[in-house]
Amino acid sequence: MLILAKYETKDIRNFALISHGGAGKTTFTEMALVKAGVKGEAGTVERGNTASDFTPEEKDKKFSITNSYFSFPWNNKQINLVDTPGYADFRGEAASALSMVEGALLLIDAGSGVEVNTHYVWEKARENGLSKFIFVNKVDKDEVDFTAVHDELQEFSEENLLPLTIPAGTGEDFQGIIDLLAGKLITENGEEKEIPGEFQDLADEYHFELIESVVESDDELMMKYLEDEEISDEEITTALFKSVGDNLTVPIFAGVASRNFGVKRTLDYLVKLIPDPSNRPPLRDINGEEVELNFSADSDVLAQVGKTMVDPYIGKLSIFRMYNGRLRKGDELYVPRLDEKLKASKLYKINGSEQKEVEELVAGDIGAVAKIGELETSDTITEPDNVVELSKLKLPEPMLIQKVTSKEGQDDEKMSNAIQRYSQEDLTFKVNFNRETKELLVHGMGTVHLDVIKKICQRKFDVSFDTSEPSVEYKETIQSKVDVEEKYKKQSGGRGQYGHVLMKFEPLQRGKGFEFEEEIFGGAVPSQYIPAVEKGVKEAMEEGVLAGYRVVDMKAVLYDGSYHDVDSSEMAFKIAASKAFKKGMEQAKPVLLEPIMKIKVVVPEDFMGDIMGDLNSRRGRILGMDPSDGKQVINAEVPQAELFSYATDLKSITGGYGQFSMEFSHYDKVPQQEAEDIIRQRRAEKE
């Protein structure tokens, strides 16, 4: 691993590669590593020998699943590069990476243009206030029109897009990349040549637009320009740096990563134009307040864990971003969430699957610490006498919920432990146990996400499991008031059992749960037996009379009864109350209740009709619609039973452009036909 012998915060450049899947990020990274001298030969995704995609699952799928971190010197700067996955199911990785850097390089497939995940990652880069750049890849494809791609990107982006390099030709006529500032053609081996005559007019046109755009952002340069004074490359670069830093301009580069066209030239520009870590956007603490920092190595330590990797052999590897201070090997880390100090025995810089031990990490660095089991993603590392706790990482919420069952012959506890351990590594994968349905549930970003997790858990922890649609947490209740009497009397020689209750049952408002009252006069039921009556009803409510679901929203009143001096007992009154409940519920028009979820669906305008129709087919009730950032936000209430497949169905309907979130709203009565089907199925399962 190559690292500058001595570097400070001002020498660091942090950026992430982002894109839709298949745009060429991993190939770009390979060529960068070769040019930097980190690798001798570039690997390919097809051969499964790239530095980024080093896990068995990535080699098998032939696409990135997790972030890959690299650190190497470039033009006397230390680059920290993060190669992120482009598949939508792994958006959490991109979100994590973009929280750790100052710059984002968006790769675009010239033949495909703006795609589904392009929108998501670009918006995340904008939310983080990053300096943004675009690399239009595969410009040597037949019939690629760079101007058309540029126009599409300009329509897609709010910022001013400014090409710094453009392709010379396309298809068989592709000759290289033209650097507009240098006024040269860059060939495959990096050699600079004069721009061929057939491309000179195009280069002049783009160069004119470039100079005009840059000088418009600087009053002093504008005066020089208007007075026909010479403007140096250094002045142009300085003005461009400011414009990029202010998020007014997005430079565009052209290239063919697989043939190493344009990669080196793009990196040359990036180290000039990406702000150093001391010029990054402000941070916010867990209360949303802006944190005042100078982002200097000479200040108190402040860092945040952006990624956790769990390995059954080497343990936990916590990858973090240094914002302030200087962390040395052997220093203690104070973690506010834990309110304790943890010792960093060893510090590392990372290159893909390799870790290199280092003596220190300075403000701006991205590094790692191993085998500190207590550290979690989003944890802040700070000073105990100057505590700052940074806001948690903003990651996408998982949309697909599945029930997990162990394969035959597998240990349930071992499976559960493995799944819980992996959830520490991937915060878009959540695990919880539903005590009502007694099912272990997992929440993932999609079917591909969960399929990959199954394979990872098999490899890392030697556990196999299946996923399926979870059970709905139905409940039962009553609709009318009833008055019942029940007597439990048993004589079997010796002391008998006797309990006698008269009770009223009535429905409560939805969500009220259970209420118990007693209106006993004259000691008809002695006070010591009244708690047993309440307990008998509560226990009986765990299994309703329709389909055996828990009963809710009901009031029970004990108003009379009788007892026997010898035979009465708490058990007898408990049984009598239980029998009274069952009799009463059967008479009180019992109904089945289902959970209703409040969902928010965000889709482009074009899909509104399809989404509305689909929600109606799911027994949904539309609450309202609001436009937001060029999209439509649909708020609705939908039965949970209709939503288990919604993550995949929404993706199918919208081509991946739709997103949704949901939360529990309330319980409501199940329509009669659906209720009959549920009751019939439930009884069949019990039999």
Image (cartoon, grey):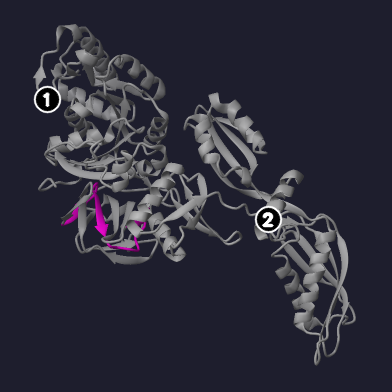
- For mark 2, give the secondary structure: helix
Q: Label 1: which residue?
A: 190
Labels 1 and 2: the sequence-earlier one: 1
- Report if residue 394 is visible in the image: no
Tell me the kind of residue under disc 2. Answer: Ala
Q: Which residues are magenta?
A: 359-381
Q: Which residue is drawn at the image coordinates 38% and 64% (left, top)?
A: 338
Residue 584 lies in quadrant: bottom right
In this rendering, is residue 551 above or below 263?
A: below
Give the left or right position of residue 646, taking residue 141 as reference.
Answer: right
**Residue 283 magenta-highlighted:** no
The residue positioned 11% from the left and 39% from the top of the image is 40
Which residue is drawn at the image coordinates 18% and 28% (left, top)?
260
Q: Pick whichever, 348 or 461, lies toward us.
A: 461
Residue 684 bears which disc, if any? 2
Q: Secondary structure at mark 1?
A: loop
Residue 537 position within the rendered picture, expressed as x and y whole percent measured from the top left:
75, 70
Q: 608 or 9, which lies in front? A: 608
Residue 408 locus on image (x, y percent): 46, 60
Q: Are there few (<14), some (14-19), or many (20+) residues within 10 Å of tag 1?
A: some
Up the image or down, 684 lies above or below 603; here it is below
Q: Is residue 189 left or right of residue 297?
A: left
Farthest residue toward the right? Answer: 522
Q: Position of residue 355 (x, y in %)?
A: 20, 52
118 up-or-down from 291: above or below? above
Can residue 373 be found in the magenta stretch?
A: yes
Mark 1 vs mark 2, foreground winner is 2
- Marks 1/2: CA–CA distance: 73 Å
Report the quarter where the C terminus lies.
bottom right
In the rendered view, does 195 fall on the left or right side of 58? left
Image coordinates for residue 304, horizontal then vertical, percent: 33, 52
Dot 2 surroundings within 10 Å: few (below 14), some, or many (20 or more)? few
